[in-house]
Image (cartoon, rainbow, N blue to C red):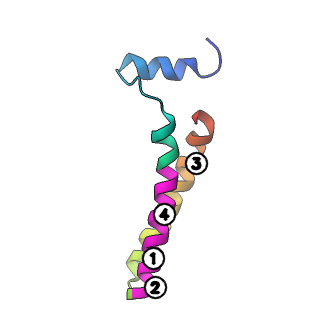
């Protein structure tokens, strides 16, 4: 096995044969878009908890960036 064949073989053994790129690449992109929406809504309607949700989205997007780069 070379590279990340073990990863794809493990996914295939549980029935996941689809490409992993869409799942990995869209997660950080969607979270960044969600962070922008939450951030603007927090400013517009003065809801500080929505600003906190925006920060949470950015932290999750940062965390998902690593496997996206590694396996993407």
Magenta segment range? 27-44
Please tell me whether mark 2 or mark 4 is closer to you in this view. 4
Tell me if residue 56 can be seen. Answer: no
**Camera-nearest label, 2 or 1:** 2
Q: Position of residue 14 (x, y in %)?
A: 35, 20
Q: Nearer the viewer, residue 64 or 32?
A: 32
**Which corner quadrant holds the N terminus?**
top right
- Cα distance, mark 1 to mark 4? 13 Å
- How far apart are the alpha carbons under marks 4 and 3? 14 Å
Residue 67 horizontal/vertical position (percent): 56, 40
Q: Position of residue 26 (x, y in %)?
A: 48, 48
Residue 43 painted magenta: yes
Instruction: State the count of labels.
Output: 4
Mark 2 to mark 3 CA distance (whole Å): 26 Å
The residue where tag 3 is placed is: 65
State the residue at coordinates (44%, 71%).
Answer: 37
Q: Is residue 37 magenta?
A: yes
């Amino acid at each position: 096995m070379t590279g990340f064949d073990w990863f794809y073989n493990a996914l295939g053994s549980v029935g996941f044969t689809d490409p992993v790129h869409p799942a990995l690449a869209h997660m950080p992109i969607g979270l960044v878009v969600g962070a922008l929406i939450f951030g603007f809504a927090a400013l517009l309607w003065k809801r500080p908890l929505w600003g906190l949700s925006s920060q949470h989205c950015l932290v999750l997007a940062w965390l998902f960036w690593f496997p996206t780069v590694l396996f993407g």
